[in-house]
Amino acid sequence: MAHLFLFTLLALSSSLPSIFAAHTASLHLRLTHVDSGQPFSSTGRIHRLVQRSHHRRKVLESRLANNSSASFNVLLKASMFDYFIEYSIGTPKLPVTGVLDTGSEVVWAKCQPCEQCDHKGISIYDPSKSSTFSKLPCSSPLYDYQPLKSVSVPKCEYVYVYGSAMINGFLATEMFSLGAESPTVNLTFGCNRLVKGTFSGASGVVDLGQGKLSLVSQLNLGRFSYCLTPFKSSSKSHLLLGDLASAKKASSGEVQSTPFLNATDQYYVAMRGISIGGNLLPIPASVFEYNKEESTGVLVDSGTGQTQLPQSAFDVIKKELQSLVGLRVKDMSKTVGLDLCFGLSSWPPPPLPDMVFHFDNGADMRMPQMNYMFADKRTRAYCLVMRPGQNGDKLTIIGNYQQQNMHIIYDVASRMLRFESTPCESF
Ligand SMILES: *[C@@H]1O[C@H](CO)[C@@H](O)[C@H](O)[C@H]1NC(C)=O
Ligand SMILES: *[C@@H]1O[C@H](CO)[C@@H](O)[C@H](O)[C@H]1NC(C)=O
Ligand SMILES: *[C@@H]1O[C@H](CO)[C@@H](O)[C@H](O)[C@H]1NC(C)=O
Ligand SMILES: *[C@@H]1O[C@H](CO)[C@@H](O)[C@H](O)[C@H]1NC(C)=O
Protein backbone atom coordinates (compact mmCIF):
# COMPACT_ATOMS: atom_id res chain seq x y z
CA MET A 1 0.00 0.00 0.00
CA ALA A 2 1.31 3.45 -0.82
CA HIS A 3 1.40 5.84 2.10
CA LEU A 4 0.91 9.29 0.90
CA PHE A 5 1.00 12.79 2.21
CA LEU A 6 1.18 15.22 -0.62
CA PHE A 7 1.11 18.92 -0.41
CA THR A 8 1.99 21.69 -2.72
CA LEU A 9 4.59 24.26 -1.95
CA LEU A 10 3.93 27.78 -3.05
CA ALA A 11 7.41 28.74 -3.91
CA LEU A 12 10.34 26.92 -5.35
CA SER A 13 13.98 27.89 -5.40
CA SER A 14 14.48 30.57 -8.03
CA SER A 15 17.34 28.60 -9.54
CA LEU A 16 14.85 26.08 -10.95
CA PRO A 17 13.04 26.82 -14.17
CA SER A 18 9.59 28.19 -13.43
CA ILE A 19 7.90 25.57 -15.59
CA PHE A 20 8.15 23.03 -12.79
CA ALA A 21 5.13 22.53 -10.71
CA ALA A 22 6.36 22.59 -7.15
CA HIS A 23 5.37 19.57 -5.13
CA THR A 24 6.77 17.73 -2.24
CA ALA A 25 5.61 14.17 -2.32
CA SER A 26 6.12 11.67 0.43
CA LEU A 27 5.73 8.16 -0.83
CA HIS A 28 6.56 4.58 0.03
CA LEU A 29 7.07 2.53 -3.14
CA ARG A 30 8.19 -1.02 -3.84
CA LEU A 31 11.18 -1.97 -5.93
CA THR A 32 11.35 -5.30 -7.73
CA HIS A 33 14.69 -6.83 -8.56
CA VAL A 34 15.07 -7.35 -12.31
CA ASP A 35 15.74 -11.07 -11.83
CA SER A 36 12.96 -11.56 -9.34
CA GLY A 37 10.60 -14.42 -10.18
CA GLN A 38 12.94 -15.72 -12.89
CA PRO A 39 14.08 -19.33 -12.86
CA PHE A 40 17.76 -18.58 -12.36
CA SER A 41 19.94 -20.53 -9.98
CA SER A 42 21.83 -18.61 -7.39
CA THR A 43 24.96 -18.84 -9.56
CA GLY A 44 23.00 -17.75 -12.61
CA ARG A 45 21.75 -14.72 -10.73
CA ILE A 46 25.18 -13.66 -9.55
CA HIS A 47 26.55 -14.13 -13.05
CA ARG A 48 23.85 -11.83 -14.41
CA LEU A 49 24.59 -9.30 -11.68
CA VAL A 50 28.25 -9.33 -12.69
CA GLN A 51 27.35 -8.72 -16.34
CA ARG A 52 25.02 -5.86 -15.52
CA SER A 53 27.62 -4.29 -13.24
CA HIS A 54 30.16 -4.49 -16.01
CA HIS A 55 27.87 -2.70 -18.44
CA ARG A 56 26.80 -0.12 -15.90
CA ARG A 57 30.38 0.72 -14.98
CA LYS A 58 30.91 1.89 -18.55
CA VAL A 59 27.85 4.10 -18.29
CA LEU A 60 29.05 5.74 -15.08
CA GLU A 61 32.58 6.13 -16.34
CA SER A 62 31.56 7.74 -19.60
CA ARG A 63 29.45 10.16 -17.57
CA LEU A 64 32.36 11.04 -15.32
CA ALA A 65 34.64 11.54 -18.31
CA ASN A 66 31.89 13.58 -20.01
CA ASN A 67 32.49 11.27 -22.92
CA SER A 68 30.17 11.74 -25.84
CA SER A 69 32.14 9.70 -28.33
CA ALA A 70 30.54 6.42 -27.36
CA SER A 71 29.87 4.05 -30.21
CA PHE A 72 26.17 3.27 -30.52
CA ASN A 73 26.64 0.38 -32.86
CA VAL A 74 27.44 -2.06 -30.14
CA LEU A 75 24.17 -3.24 -28.71
CA LEU A 76 24.94 -4.82 -25.41
CA LYS A 77 22.67 -7.58 -24.24
CA ALA A 78 23.21 -7.03 -20.56
CA SER A 79 21.13 -4.32 -19.03
CA MET A 80 22.46 -1.72 -16.64
CA PHE A 81 19.77 -1.39 -14.00
CA ASP A 82 18.87 -3.64 -11.12
CA TYR A 83 15.47 -2.45 -9.87
CA PHE A 84 12.06 -2.02 -11.44
CA ILE A 85 9.54 0.52 -10.22
CA GLU A 86 5.82 0.67 -11.11
CA TYR A 87 4.05 3.90 -11.98
CA SER A 88 1.63 5.23 -14.53
CA ILE A 89 1.78 7.84 -17.26
CA GLY A 90 -0.86 9.98 -18.94
CA THR A 91 -4.63 10.39 -18.86
CA PRO A 92 -6.14 7.84 -18.80
CA LYS A 93 -3.39 6.31 -16.68
CA LEU A 94 -1.21 3.78 -18.44
CA PRO A 95 0.52 1.52 -15.89
CA VAL A 96 4.15 0.95 -16.82
CA THR A 97 7.28 -0.59 -15.38
CA GLY A 98 10.39 1.53 -15.40
CA VAL A 99 13.84 1.17 -13.94
CA LEU A 100 15.26 3.16 -11.07
CA ASP A 101 18.45 5.12 -11.66
CA THR A 102 20.38 7.30 -9.24
CA GLY A 103 23.14 8.03 -11.73
CA SER A 104 21.50 9.81 -14.66
CA GLU A 105 19.90 13.14 -15.55
CA VAL A 106 16.48 12.66 -17.07
CA VAL A 107 13.14 10.95 -16.47
CA TRP A 108 12.09 9.37 -19.74
CA ALA A 109 9.59 7.07 -21.39
CA LYS A 110 9.51 5.07 -24.59
CA CYS A 111 6.99 6.88 -26.75
CA GLN A 112 4.95 5.52 -29.65
CA PRO A 113 5.89 5.30 -32.44
CA CYS A 114 9.24 4.17 -31.11
CA GLU A 115 12.00 2.81 -33.31
CA GLN A 116 14.18 -0.03 -32.07
CA CYS A 117 12.37 0.01 -28.75
CA ASP A 118 12.23 -3.36 -27.20
CA HIS A 119 8.42 -3.81 -27.19
CA LYS A 120 8.27 -7.37 -25.97
CA GLY A 121 5.40 -7.76 -23.56
CA ILE A 122 5.58 -4.21 -22.25
CA SER A 123 3.28 -1.22 -22.33
CA ILE A 124 4.58 1.65 -24.37
CA TYR A 125 3.16 5.08 -23.75
CA ASP A 126 1.38 6.68 -26.69
CA PRO A 127 1.19 10.50 -26.40
CA SER A 128 -1.61 10.66 -28.98
CA LYS A 129 -3.84 8.71 -26.58
CA SER A 130 -3.32 10.95 -23.57
CA SER A 131 -5.25 14.17 -22.95
CA THR A 132 -2.58 15.63 -20.66
CA PHE A 133 0.42 15.29 -22.96
CA SER A 134 2.06 18.50 -24.01
CA LYS A 135 5.23 19.00 -26.02
CA LEU A 136 7.73 21.60 -24.78
CA PRO A 137 8.28 24.43 -27.23
CA CYS A 138 11.50 24.21 -29.23
CA SER A 139 12.54 27.47 -27.62
CA SER A 140 12.62 25.81 -24.18
CA PRO A 141 15.97 26.48 -22.49
CA LEU A 142 15.96 22.84 -21.41
CA TYR A 143 17.08 21.94 -24.91
CA ASP A 144 20.34 23.66 -23.98
CA TYR A 145 20.79 21.55 -20.86
CA GLN A 146 24.24 20.09 -21.48
CA PRO A 147 23.65 16.42 -20.52
CA LEU A 148 20.88 16.26 -23.14
CA LYS A 149 23.03 17.38 -26.03
CA SER A 150 26.25 15.52 -25.62
CA VAL A 151 26.25 14.86 -29.36
CA SER A 152 24.93 17.19 -32.04
CA VAL A 153 21.21 16.73 -32.56
CA PRO A 154 18.53 18.37 -34.69
CA LYS A 155 16.68 21.30 -33.15
CA CYS A 156 13.90 20.30 -30.73
CA GLU A 157 15.47 16.95 -29.99
CA TYR A 158 17.87 15.60 -27.42
CA VAL A 159 20.22 12.68 -27.23
CA TYR A 160 21.24 11.19 -23.94
CA VAL A 161 24.07 8.70 -23.77
CA TYR A 162 24.36 5.70 -21.44
CA GLY A 163 27.86 4.42 -22.20
CA SER A 164 27.24 2.50 -25.38
CA ALA A 165 23.45 2.84 -25.24
CA MET A 166 21.51 5.96 -26.09
CA ILE A 167 18.08 7.52 -26.23
CA ASN A 168 16.76 10.14 -28.62
CA GLY A 169 13.50 12.07 -28.55
CA PHE A 170 11.93 15.35 -27.52
CA LEU A 171 10.93 16.98 -24.25
CA ALA A 172 7.34 17.10 -23.06
CA THR A 173 5.20 17.40 -19.96
CA GLU A 174 2.79 14.76 -18.75
CA MET A 175 0.94 13.64 -15.64
CA PHE A 176 2.73 10.82 -13.80
CA SER A 177 1.42 8.82 -10.91
CA LEU A 178 3.96 7.09 -8.71
CA GLY A 179 2.33 4.36 -6.69
CA ALA A 180 -1.23 3.18 -7.14
CA GLU A 181 -2.95 5.52 -4.71
CA SER A 182 -0.97 8.66 -5.22
CA PRO A 183 -2.22 11.79 -6.96
CA THR A 184 -0.67 12.67 -10.27
CA VAL A 185 2.20 15.08 -10.73
CA ASN A 186 3.08 17.05 -13.82
CA LEU A 187 6.62 16.15 -14.89
CA THR A 188 8.91 17.22 -17.67
CA PHE A 189 10.22 14.08 -19.31
CA GLY A 190 12.00 12.77 -22.35
CA CYS A 191 9.63 11.22 -24.88
CA ASN A 192 11.85 8.80 -26.78
CA ARG A 193 11.38 7.86 -30.38
CA LEU A 194 14.63 5.94 -30.55
CA VAL A 195 16.09 3.72 -27.85
CA LYS A 196 19.35 1.87 -28.55
CA GLY A 197 20.55 -0.57 -25.96
CA THR A 198 18.90 -2.83 -23.44
CA PHE A 199 16.88 -1.28 -20.67
CA SER A 200 15.78 -4.51 -18.95
CA GLY A 201 12.58 -4.53 -20.98
CA ALA A 202 11.41 -1.42 -19.10
CA SER A 203 9.14 1.30 -20.46
CA GLY A 204 11.30 4.10 -19.14
CA VAL A 205 13.65 5.39 -16.48
CA VAL A 206 12.85 7.12 -13.19
CA ASP A 207 15.87 9.24 -12.44
CA LEU A 208 16.75 10.13 -8.87
CA GLY A 209 19.97 11.98 -9.69
CA GLN A 210 20.62 15.60 -8.84
CA GLY A 211 20.28 17.14 -12.30
CA LYS A 212 17.49 19.67 -12.89
CA LEU A 213 15.29 17.19 -14.77
CA SER A 214 15.48 14.44 -12.17
CA LEU A 215 12.48 13.46 -10.07
CA VAL A 216 14.33 14.79 -7.01
CA SER A 217 14.62 18.27 -8.51
CA GLN A 218 11.24 18.40 -10.19
CA LEU A 219 9.35 17.30 -7.07
CA ASN A 220 11.71 19.23 -4.82
CA LEU A 221 12.07 16.04 -2.79
CA GLY A 222 14.80 17.08 -0.37
CA ARG A 223 15.59 13.46 0.30
CA PHE A 224 14.85 9.88 -0.68
CA SER A 225 15.99 6.51 0.57
CA TYR A 226 15.92 2.83 -0.21
CA CYS A 227 16.21 -0.40 1.69
CA LEU A 228 17.32 -3.35 -0.46
CA THR A 229 16.30 -6.83 0.63
CA PRO A 230 19.01 -9.53 0.61
CA PHE A 231 20.26 -10.87 -2.71
CA LYS A 232 18.69 -14.27 -2.08
CA SER A 233 15.38 -12.87 -0.83
CA SER A 234 12.26 -12.87 -2.97
CA SER A 235 10.72 -9.93 -1.07
CA LYS A 236 10.45 -6.58 -2.73
CA SER A 237 12.73 -3.73 -1.74
CA HIS A 238 11.59 -0.29 -0.59
CA LEU A 239 11.92 3.20 -1.99
CA LEU A 240 10.90 6.18 0.11
CA LEU A 241 10.49 9.65 -1.33
CA GLY A 242 10.38 12.89 0.65
CA ASP A 243 9.75 13.17 4.37
CA LEU A 244 9.27 9.43 4.87
CA ALA A 245 12.93 8.92 3.98
CA SER A 246 14.08 9.33 7.57
CA ALA A 247 16.32 7.21 9.71
CA LYS A 248 14.47 4.53 11.71
CA LYS A 249 16.97 4.42 14.50
CA ALA A 250 17.09 7.25 16.95
CA SER A 251 20.57 6.93 18.36
CA SER A 252 23.08 8.89 16.35
CA GLY A 253 25.68 6.14 16.74
CA GLU A 254 23.53 3.79 14.69
CA VAL A 255 22.94 6.24 11.87
CA GLN A 256 26.11 7.15 10.02
CA SER A 257 26.43 10.30 7.92
CA THR A 258 28.99 11.47 5.40
CA PRO A 259 28.78 14.51 3.09
CA PHE A 260 28.30 14.26 -0.67
CA LEU A 261 31.07 15.94 -2.61
CA ASN A 262 30.10 19.30 -4.03
CA ALA A 263 32.19 19.12 -7.15
CA THR A 264 29.71 17.05 -9.11
CA ASP A 265 26.05 16.27 -9.77
CA GLN A 266 26.61 12.58 -9.10
CA TYR A 267 26.52 10.97 -5.66
CA TYR A 268 30.22 11.00 -4.80
CA VAL A 269 31.44 10.64 -1.23
CA ALA A 270 34.89 10.73 0.38
CA MET A 271 36.16 7.30 1.41
CA ARG A 272 39.24 7.02 3.62
CA GLY A 273 39.93 3.33 3.92
CA ILE A 274 38.69 -0.23 4.32
CA SER A 275 39.08 -2.61 7.21
CA ILE A 276 38.29 -6.27 7.72
CA GLY A 277 37.77 -7.68 11.20
CA GLY A 278 39.04 -4.48 12.78
CA ASN A 279 42.27 -4.38 10.76
CA LEU A 280 42.71 -1.27 8.69
CA LEU A 281 44.06 -2.53 5.37
CA PRO A 282 47.19 -0.91 3.91
CA ILE A 283 45.41 1.01 1.14
CA PRO A 284 46.51 4.62 0.72
CA ALA A 285 43.51 6.98 1.11
CA SER A 286 44.70 8.78 -2.03
CA VAL A 287 43.41 5.97 -4.29
CA PHE A 288 39.85 7.00 -3.38
CA GLU A 289 40.27 10.74 -3.95
CA TYR A 290 37.92 12.41 -6.38
CA ASN A 291 39.66 13.70 -9.50
CA LYS A 292 37.65 14.42 -12.60
CA GLU A 293 40.62 14.41 -14.99
CA GLU A 294 41.78 11.03 -13.77
CA SER A 295 38.25 9.63 -13.36
CA THR A 296 38.84 8.66 -9.77
CA GLY A 297 36.57 8.99 -6.77
CA VAL A 298 33.94 7.03 -4.87
CA LEU A 299 30.44 6.88 -6.27
CA VAL A 300 27.47 5.37 -4.42
CA ASP A 301 25.16 3.65 -6.86
CA SER A 302 21.85 1.83 -6.70
CA GLY A 303 22.07 0.27 -10.14
CA THR A 304 25.48 -1.41 -9.94
CA GLY A 305 25.54 -4.83 -8.28
CA GLN A 306 29.12 -5.49 -7.30
CA THR A 307 31.45 -2.89 -5.89
CA GLN A 308 34.32 -1.88 -8.11
CA LEU A 309 37.64 -0.84 -6.60
CA PRO A 310 40.92 0.38 -8.06
CA GLN A 311 43.15 -2.64 -8.80
CA SER A 312 45.63 -1.75 -6.04
CA ALA A 313 42.88 -1.66 -3.39
CA PHE A 314 41.33 -4.88 -4.72
CA ASP A 315 44.70 -6.65 -4.51
CA VAL A 316 45.07 -5.72 -0.83
CA ILE A 317 41.59 -7.08 -0.03
CA LYS A 318 42.31 -10.23 -2.01
CA LYS A 319 45.50 -10.88 -0.07
CA GLU A 320 43.73 -10.33 3.26
CA LEU A 321 40.86 -12.67 2.34
CA GLN A 322 43.23 -15.36 1.13
CA SER A 323 44.88 -15.39 4.52
CA LEU A 324 41.55 -15.29 6.41
CA VAL A 325 39.75 -17.96 4.36
CA GLY A 326 42.75 -20.28 4.11
CA LEU A 327 41.39 -22.13 1.06
CA ARG A 328 42.73 -22.41 -2.45
CA VAL A 329 41.74 -19.70 -4.93
CA LYS A 330 39.75 -21.26 -7.75
CA ASP A 331 39.17 -19.70 -11.15
CA MET A 332 35.38 -19.54 -11.50
CA SER A 333 35.34 -16.57 -13.88
CA LYS A 334 33.52 -18.59 -16.55
CA THR A 335 30.83 -20.04 -14.31
CA VAL A 336 30.24 -17.57 -11.51
CA GLY A 337 31.87 -14.61 -13.24
CA LEU A 338 33.41 -13.15 -10.10
CA ASP A 339 37.09 -12.29 -9.91
CA LEU A 340 38.06 -13.90 -6.63
CA CYS A 341 36.61 -17.30 -5.69
CA PHE A 342 37.60 -20.03 -3.28
CA GLY A 343 36.60 -23.64 -3.84
CA LEU A 344 34.83 -25.06 -0.78
CA SER A 345 35.48 -28.59 0.31
CA SER A 346 32.83 -28.48 3.03
CA TRP A 347 29.67 -26.60 3.85
CA PRO A 348 29.03 -24.09 5.38
CA PRO A 349 31.93 -21.86 4.32
CA PRO A 350 34.34 -20.51 6.94
CA PRO A 351 32.86 -17.41 8.58
CA LEU A 352 34.48 -14.07 7.87
CA PRO A 353 34.44 -10.93 10.01
CA ASP A 354 32.68 -7.71 9.00
CA MET A 355 34.21 -5.52 6.35
CA VAL A 356 33.98 -1.78 6.97
CA PHE A 357 34.18 1.08 4.47
CA HIS A 358 35.39 4.20 6.29
CA PHE A 359 34.04 7.51 5.04
CA ASP A 360 34.61 11.14 5.86
CA ASN A 361 33.00 12.47 9.00
CA GLY A 362 33.74 9.18 10.79
CA ALA A 363 30.95 7.32 9.00
CA ASP A 364 31.50 3.55 8.89
CA MET A 365 29.58 1.28 6.55
CA ARG A 366 29.73 -2.08 8.29
CA MET A 367 29.11 -5.09 6.07
CA PRO A 368 28.59 -8.58 7.39
CA GLN A 369 29.93 -11.46 5.31
CA MET A 370 26.67 -11.78 3.34
CA ASN A 371 27.20 -8.21 2.04
CA TYR A 372 30.49 -8.99 0.38
CA MET A 373 30.76 -12.76 -0.14
CA PHE A 374 28.68 -15.00 -2.38
CA ALA A 375 28.41 -18.59 -1.16
CA ASP A 376 26.76 -21.36 -3.14
CA LYS A 377 26.33 -24.86 -1.80
CA ARG A 378 25.70 -26.51 -5.17
CA THR A 379 28.80 -25.21 -6.98
CA ARG A 380 30.89 -24.95 -3.79
CA ALA A 381 31.78 -21.41 -4.74
CA TYR A 382 32.78 -18.87 -2.12
CA CYS A 383 33.50 -15.59 -3.85
CA LEU A 384 34.10 -11.91 -3.20
CA VAL A 385 31.40 -9.78 -4.84
CA MET A 386 33.80 -7.00 -5.80
CA ARG A 387 35.86 -6.43 -8.88
CA PRO A 388 39.04 -4.56 -9.74
CA GLY A 389 38.73 -1.76 -12.28
CA GLN A 390 40.23 -3.01 -15.52
CA ASN A 391 42.55 -1.30 -17.98
CA GLY A 392 43.65 1.22 -15.41
CA ASP A 393 40.14 2.15 -14.30
CA LYS A 394 40.45 3.78 -10.93
CA LEU A 395 36.84 4.70 -10.20
CA THR A 396 35.33 3.19 -7.05
CA ILE A 397 31.63 2.31 -7.29
CA ILE A 398 29.82 1.14 -4.17
CA GLY A 399 27.38 -1.41 -5.51
CA ASN A 400 24.02 -2.59 -4.24
CA TYR A 401 25.22 -6.07 -3.16
CA GLN A 402 27.14 -4.20 -0.49
CA GLN A 403 24.00 -2.24 0.47
CA GLN A 404 21.76 -5.21 1.35
CA ASN A 405 19.82 -4.77 4.57
CA MET A 406 20.85 -1.16 4.85
CA HIS A 407 18.58 1.84 4.83
CA ILE A 408 20.43 4.30 2.60
CA ILE A 409 19.22 7.88 2.79
CA TYR A 410 20.20 10.40 0.12
CA ASP A 411 19.66 13.62 2.02
CA VAL A 412 20.05 15.85 -1.00
CA ALA A 413 18.87 19.01 0.78
CA SER A 414 21.56 18.73 3.46
CA ARG A 415 23.99 17.11 1.02
CA MET A 416 24.55 14.10 3.26
CA LEU A 417 24.50 10.37 2.68
CA ARG A 418 23.10 8.63 5.77
CA PHE A 419 22.85 4.91 6.38
CA GLU A 420 21.76 2.47 9.05
CA SER A 421 21.74 -1.34 9.16
CA THR A 422 18.24 -2.70 9.16
CA PRO A 423 16.46 -5.89 8.04
CA CYS A 424 14.80 -4.68 4.82
CA GLU A 425 12.39 -7.63 4.54
CA SER A 426 10.55 -6.35 7.61
CA PHE A 427 11.13 -2.68 6.83
C1 LIG B 1 31.13 18.34 -21.14
O1 LIG B 1 31.58 18.67 -22.43
C2 LIG B 1 30.88 19.74 -23.05
C3 LIG B 1 31.43 19.93 -24.45
O2 LIG B 1 31.64 18.71 -25.08
C4 LIG B 1 31.04 21.00 -22.20
O3 LIG B 1 30.26 22.05 -22.78
C5 LIG B 1 30.54 20.73 -20.79
O4 LIG B 1 30.75 21.85 -19.96
C6 LIG B 1 31.23 19.54 -20.20
N1 LIG B 1 30.60 19.21 -18.91
C7 LIG B 1 31.28 19.00 -17.80
C8 LIG B 1 30.47 18.66 -16.59
O5 LIG B 1 32.49 19.02 -17.77
C1 LIG C 1 35.14 7.65 -24.74
O1 LIG C 1 34.33 6.66 -25.35
C2 LIG C 1 34.99 5.93 -26.38
C3 LIG C 1 33.98 4.99 -27.03
O2 LIG C 1 33.26 4.26 -26.09
C4 LIG C 1 36.18 5.19 -25.77
O3 LIG C 1 36.85 4.48 -26.77
C5 LIG C 1 37.10 6.19 -25.11
O4 LIG C 1 38.16 5.50 -24.46
C6 LIG C 1 36.35 7.04 -24.07
N1 LIG C 1 37.22 8.08 -23.53
C7 LIG C 1 37.33 8.30 -22.21
C8 LIG C 1 38.19 9.45 -21.83
O5 LIG C 1 36.73 7.63 -21.39
C1 LIG D 1 2.19 20.70 -17.01
O1 LIG D 1 3.06 21.84 -16.86
C2 LIG D 1 3.34 22.53 -18.07
C3 LIG D 1 4.35 23.60 -17.76
O2 LIG D 1 3.94 24.36 -16.70
C4 LIG D 1 2.04 23.08 -18.66
O3 LIG D 1 2.32 23.71 -19.89
C5 LIG D 1 1.08 21.92 -18.89
O4 LIG D 1 -0.15 22.40 -19.34
C6 LIG D 1 0.87 21.16 -17.59
N1 LIG D 1 0.07 19.97 -17.88
C7 LIG D 1 -1.06 19.72 -17.22
C8 LIG D 1 -1.80 18.52 -17.67
O5 LIG D 1 -1.43 20.39 -16.28
C1 LIG E 1 29.57 21.77 0.17
O1 LIG E 1 29.14 23.13 0.14
C2 LIG E 1 28.46 23.54 1.33
C3 LIG E 1 27.95 24.94 1.10
O2 LIG E 1 28.90 25.74 0.48
C4 LIG E 1 29.42 23.44 2.52
O3 LIG E 1 28.74 23.81 3.70
C5 LIG E 1 29.87 21.98 2.64
O4 LIG E 1 30.82 21.86 3.68
C6 LIG E 1 30.51 21.51 1.34
N1 LIG E 1 30.75 20.07 1.44
C7 LIG E 1 31.91 19.52 1.14
C8 LIG E 1 32.00 18.03 1.29
O5 LIG E 1 32.89 20.15 0.76
Image (cartoon, helix red, strand yellow):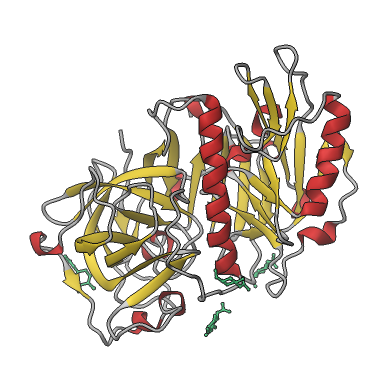
Name the residue at 64% across, 72% down.
Answer: 263
Image point 32% across, 62% down: which residue? 195
Residue 80 spot, x, y in % from top left:
47, 51
Please state which of residues 421 and 96 is positioned toward the viewer in this rendering.
Answer: 96
Residue 80 visible in the snapshot:
yes
Horizontal and vertical percent position of residue 253: 72, 38
x 55%, y 74%: residue: 67
Q: In which quadrant of this rendering is ligand 3 seen?
A: bottom left
Q: Give the camera-side residue of 194 and 184.
A: 194
User: Foreground: 159 or 273?
Assistant: 159
Residue 367, how many percent across, how many down? 70, 34
Is residue 338 positioned above or below 369 on the image?
below
- Tell me: 85 left or right of 161: left
**Does residue 273 show up?**
no
Q: Quadrant of residue 46?
A: top right
Going by the image, does 135 lie left or right of 296? left
